[in-house]
Image (cartoon, grey):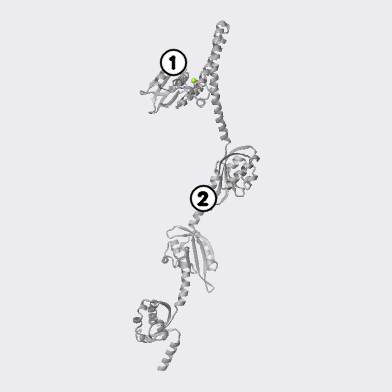
Amino acid sequence: METQLENGYEILERITDGFFAVDQQWNFTYVNTEAARLLFRNRDDLIGKNVWDEFPEAIRLPFFEHYHKAVNEQVPVTFDAFFDPLQTWFGVRAYPSPNGLTVYFRDITEEKMKSTEKDQHYQSLFHENPDAVYSFDLLGNYLNINKATKELLGYSEEELLGQSYKIVISEEDMEKTVHHFNLAVSGLPQRYKIHTIHKDGSIILLDVTNLPIIVHGEVVGVYGIGKDITAQKQAEEELQTTSQQLQSFIENNADPIFIYNMDNEVVQVNKAFEETFGWLKQEIVGKGLYSLPLIPANKWNEVCELDAIVKQGKHVIDKETVRLRKDGTRLDVMLSISPIIDAKGNMNGWSTTVRDVTEWKKSQEMLQNTEKLSIAGQLAAGIAHEIRNPITAIKGFLQLMSSAHDEYKDYFNIISSEIERIEQILSELLILAKPQVSKFERKDIKVLLAQVITLLDTQAILNNVEIVAEYQPGVTYIECDENQLKQVFINFIKNSIEAMPNGGRLVVKISKVNSEQIKIQFIDGGVGMSKETLAKLGSPFYTTKENGTGLGFMISRKIIENHFGEICITSEQNNGTTIDIILPIRI
Ligand code: ADP
Ligand code: MG
C-alpha cells in the first residue's frame, strides 16, 4: 500500500505540472517538487500547513473562490489566475475528492503575456478608437461598446448592452438599417449613412460600417463602426451655401462678369453679360479668350498685356477700353480683372468685371458742354454790354424820327417797345453772367427790402395789391451783394404782383432760422403754378406771361446760390405761392 502510494507519488513527481493535495481542513498533504519550485517554497515546510495561512494573498484572488466551488459543489474546476505575490499566471485544474482537493497547476505567464498583449492590442483598437466601435449578437443586441460609442450616443454601457440597435435608429432610417444589418449577419460587410438619435434627442448623421464577426467560419455577431459626419455634412452644406451666394452674386451682378480658367477659356458669364453684349451664355462659354468675338482687332495687343499681368497674380483695376456687342456696335467699358485663388493658394483662373461706361462718357461730355456754356454765357454778357450802346443810339434816333413822322407813330411805338424788351433781356442777361464782380458787404436785409418795396409800391397800388412787411425783431444784418439781392427781391415781388391781376395781399416776412441763417418769405394769394410750370421754373426763357422774359427765376436762383443760400417754392394752382429764401448770415 505504502509502495503503491509511493509509486503514485513517484508518478506525480514525474509530471511536469505542479501538483499538491490538501485535506478537508485545507492542510497540505502532498506537494510535488515542481509545485514547490513554482511556489518558491520548501515542500517539507508546507506539508501539514494550511493553504490559506501559507498563501493568504490567494484568499482575495480567484483561487479561493474556485477551490471552494470545487469542494462545495464537488465539481472539477479549470481556471487561469494571476498570483501577484509571485507575479505569475497559473493555469489551474482542481479536482475534489472525499479527502479534500488535488490541484494541478503550471506557470502560464509567458503564454498569458503573449495573448494578453495581443488582446490588449485589439482591446485598445476597440476601446480607444476615436470612432464609435461596437458589437452585436446575431439579433442586433449590443454586446460591447467602446468609449466613443458612449460619447456619441450618450448612453452608458449598462443602458445599452443587451439592447437592440433599434433604440438609437431614427424612424425614417429604420428599414434601411435593418436591411443592412441583416446583410451583415449573412456575411456581407456593409457601409451606409443613417440618422441616429442621441440620448438627449439630438440627431446625429452617422457613416456606418457593419462587419460580420466570423469565428470558425461562422458568423456569430456583427461589428459596427460609426463615424459622426454631422459636422462634415454641415460644413459641406455651408460650403454649398457660400458657393451658392457667390454664384448668385456673380449671376445677379449689375455689371457683366466673365470667369476664365487658366487655359484662357470662358468658364462662366452672367445675366448682365447677356443683356449688355447681346450674346447668349452658351455662345461664349467654352470659347478661348483669343477667339472671343467681343474684342476689337486693334485691342489684341492690349489683351495680351493684360493677360500677362493677371497671370502674375496681379489685379487690373478700371482699365478703360472698348469691346464689341453682338451686333458689332462699340461699347465703352472699364475692366477690373482679378486672379481667382483656390484654398491652397494656387491661381486657377481669373474674373473680369466689365463696367459699361457709355453713360458715364456721355455725362463727361455734358460736363464739358456745361463748361462751354458757361464760357458762352460770359461771352454773351460781354456782347450784351456791347449791344447796349448801339441800342441806346437806335432809341435816340427813333425818337427823333417819330416826332418827324407822325403817320408812323404806331410803328414807332411798336419798335420802341420791342427795343425796351431787348434792353430788359440784356440787363437780366448781364446780371446772370456777372456774379464775379459782386461785392459782399454787411447789409441790413430789412433796409434792402424796404427800398425795393418803395420802388415797387406804385406798381402794386396800380394792381390793387397790398404789400405787408412782417419783420421778426432782431438783428437782420447779413453779408451780401446789395444790388444782386435787390434784383432777387424785385423779381419775386413783381412775380407776385403779376400773379394777382385782380389785386390781393403780398406778405413779405423776415425771420431768423437760427444763429447762422435768415429766412425771407414772399407769400402771395395769386394764381399759383401748375405742376408743369413748377417743373419748368428756372429753365431759361420759360414764361407764361405775354411780356415775360422767363429769366427772373433763373437769375434769382443763380444769385442766391452765389450767396450760398437756397430757394424753396410752395405753390398750388389757384391757391397762391410762397417763396422761401434761406440765406447764411455770414459767408
Ligand atoms: P417771368 O416773370 O418773366 O415770366 P420768371 O422766371 O420770373 O419769368 O417766372 C417764370 C414763370 O413762373 C412765370 O411766367 C409764372 O408762370 C411763374 N411764376 C413765377 N412766380 C409766380 C408767382 N408768384 N405766382 C404764380 N406764378 C408764378
Ligand atoms: Mg418774373
Q: Is residue 213 visible?
A: yes
The image shows residue 412 at horizontal and vertical percentages of 56, 10
Q: For the residues carrying marks 2 and 1, which lies nearer the camera in this image?
A: 1
Query: Element at badge 2?
Result: helix
Mark 2 vs ligand 1: CB below 8 Å: no
Residue type, mark 2 in image: Thr
Q: Are marks 2 and 1 in contact (CB under 8 Å)?
A: no
User: Which disc number belongs to residue 455?
Assistant: 1
Query: Element at badge 1?
Result: helix
Residue type, mark 1 in image: Leu
Which label's residue is closer to the chain start, 2 or 1?
2
User: Which disc number belongs to residue 241?
Assistant: 2
The image shows residue 207 at horizontal and vertical percentages of 51, 61
The image shows residue 537 at horizontal and vertical percentages of 50, 25
What residue sits 40% from the left and 19% below the top? 447
| Residue positioned most to the left | 53
Q: Quadrant of residue 504?
A: top left
User: Which disc number belongs to residue 43?
Assistant: none
| 399 or 340, nearer to the observer | 340
In the image, 516: left or right of 392? left
In the image, 476: left or right of 436? left
What residue sits 46% from the left and 59% below the top? 197
| 495 or 465, nearer to the observer | 495
**584 in relation to 494, above or below:** below
